[in-house]
Image: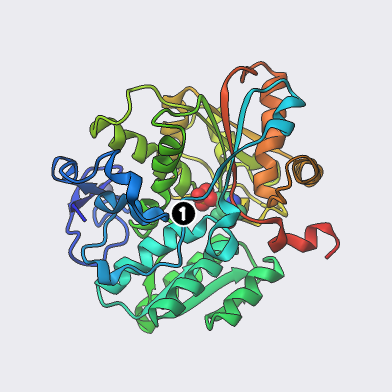
């Protein structure tokens, strides 16, 4: 609502926020939305939030859409931050939480990004949106585009979970399956978009999905009574959620809502696709493509991320890290989380619990700390992993 302009995350060049934008026109890196936070603060107070809508649109002043009428919503966000006492007790943890993003429309946290991107597309009068997706972004785009009466053109790897393909088809999207990875799907969108008149809503190549995702950071703070956890474990593909949360923490500090202390942020990836883990460990600023990427956690099957340097900066500045777990660990941890807490997590969510065990064993995370695991989707979308 108080959006002023977009600025490049790498070179700082300003871009007009009144027209559709993708990447920086000078250097090709992602753009961030900037707000007049002083103006926002007139109505955006902790107190005012008490009576607001129970969706992420409660943070309206720091979201980009100008007019209420352009908001395309299915009730996304404001998901529960569930204490996980039984799972925690196994490791002597007192303050373990699961942010249960499976409770979003379309069963994953991709709904957060897409509600913002599709609302902005409506504000700009766009009619045809395209996305390369490992699965859940596709389902979310299909849903929000249908709700807005727009076309969704979706490109997914052929081995994407069946649930993602079926949900897109049933919500009227145009679905193309590609023999390759999400990067190959992205290349296909890039090649065809000009001729087809599609607007590309690829993660971080479109500036507003990150705005929707940043509400994760606002929610964590609000749900913990304006404190932040000590440790966050986040299953990372393109990294929009991690980058978004980091941005939200900065905004909240400038609003005077929190102090300078940050959680230690940990990226969790699969051993079969761990570009950020490798770059973090070798001290690189950018992450080389992970050649031959494979993992059943489709959301983590992102061999190359355009926001790599933003993520790596945040991980380092937070004093956190990056850790890879095997598919076998994810699958066995799924049942452990499921049978202990009644949450059937996506493999990506289970990966965070697997990573936590490693961090506890290494002493990197202490049992007395407040720890948040992100369950980014529901296990119901991944029945193939369990013989379904
Ligand atoms: C997309 C996705 C991720 C990765 O999210 P990013 O913010 O792109 O890093 C993790 N888990 C699931 C289930 C996903 O769909
Ligand atoms: Zn730039």
In the picture shown, does residue 233 fall above or below 295?
above
- Give the residue at x 83% y 58%: 386
- The vertical placement of 327 against 91, above or below, is below
Q: Position of residue 80 (x, y in %)?
A: 54, 46
Say what secondary structure mark 1 lies in.
Answer: loop
Numbered circles on residues, count: 1
Q: What residue is drawn where x is 33% and y is 23%?
A: 260
What is the residue that sits farthest to the front in this orientation? 51
Residue 239 pos. (x, y %): 49, 46
Residue in the picture at 35% in, 40% down: 248
Near mark 1 (Cα within 10 A), the count class, few <14, some 14-19 or many ≥20, is many
- Quadrant of the image occupied by residue 28: bottom left
Question: Is 57 on the left or on the right of 296, as rendered?
Answer: left
Viewer-nearest residue: 45 or 206: 45
State the residue position of label 1. Answer: 77
Asked if residue 385 shows in the view, the reply is: yes
Q: Does the image show residue 304?
A: no
Q: Is mark 1 within 8 Å of ligand 1?
A: no
Which quadrant: the N terminus?
Answer: bottom left
Q: Nearer the viewer, residue 234 or 215?
A: 215
Percent position of residue 169, x then y: 60, 81
Q: Residue at x 72, y 51 (%)?
A: 344
Left or right: 100 in relation to 86: left
Q: Viewed as shown, does residue 181 lie left or right of 4? A: right
Return the x and y of residue 336 as percentages of the image width and height: 79, 40
Image: 58 above or below 73: above
Which image quarter holds the C terminus? bottom right
The colour scheme used to paint the residues is: rainbow
Q: Is residue 262 above or below residue 192?
A: above
């Amino acid at each position: 609502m108080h959006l002023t302009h977009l600025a490049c995350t790498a070179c700082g060049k300003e871009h007009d926020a009144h027209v559709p934008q993708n990447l920086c026109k000078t250097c090709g890196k992602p753009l961030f939305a900037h707000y007049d936070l002083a103006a926002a603060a007139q109505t955006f107070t902790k107190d005012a939030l008490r009576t607001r809508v129970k969706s992420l649109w409660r943070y309206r002043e720091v979201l980009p859409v100008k007019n209420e009428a352009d908001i395309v919503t299915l009730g996304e966000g404001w998901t529960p931050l569930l204490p996980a006492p039984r799972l925690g007790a196994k490791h002597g943890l007192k303050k373990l939480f699961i942010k249960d993003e499976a409770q979003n429309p379309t069963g994953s946290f991709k709904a957060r990004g897409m509600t913002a991107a599709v609302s902005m597309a409506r504000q700009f009068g766009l009619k045809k949106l395209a996305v390369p997706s490992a699965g859940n972004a596709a389902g979310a785009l299909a849903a929000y585009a249908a709700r807005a009466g727009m076309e969704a053109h979706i490109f997914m790897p052929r081995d994407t979970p069946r649930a993602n393909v079926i949900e897109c088809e049933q919500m009227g999207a145009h679905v193309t399956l590609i023999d390759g990875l999400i990067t190959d799907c992205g290349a296909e969108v890039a090649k065809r978009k000009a001729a087809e008149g599609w607007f590309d809503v690829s993660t971080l190549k479109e500036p507003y999905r990150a705005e929707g995702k940043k509400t994760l950071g606002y929610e964590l703070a609000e749900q913990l009574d304006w404190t932040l956890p000590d440790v966050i474990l986040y299953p990372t593909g393109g990294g929009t959620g991690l980058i978004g949360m980091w941005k939200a923490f900065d905004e909240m500090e400038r609003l005077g809502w929190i102090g300078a202390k940050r959680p230690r942020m940990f990226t969790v990836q699969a051993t079969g696709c761990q570009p950020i883990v490798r770059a973090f460990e070798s001290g690189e600023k950018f992450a080389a493509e992970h050649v031959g990427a494979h993992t059943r956690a489709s959301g983590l099957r992102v061999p190359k991320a355009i926001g790599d340097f933003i993520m790596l900066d945040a991980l380092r500045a937070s004093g956190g890290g990056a850790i890879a777990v095997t598919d076998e660990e994810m699958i066995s941890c799924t049942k452990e989380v499921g049978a202990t807490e009644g949450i059937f997590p996506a493999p990506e969510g289970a990966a965070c619990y697997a990573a936590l065990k490693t961090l506890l064993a290494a002493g990197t995370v202490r049992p007395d700390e407040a720890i948040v695991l992100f369950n980014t989707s529901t296990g119901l979308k991944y029945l193939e992993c369990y013989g379904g």
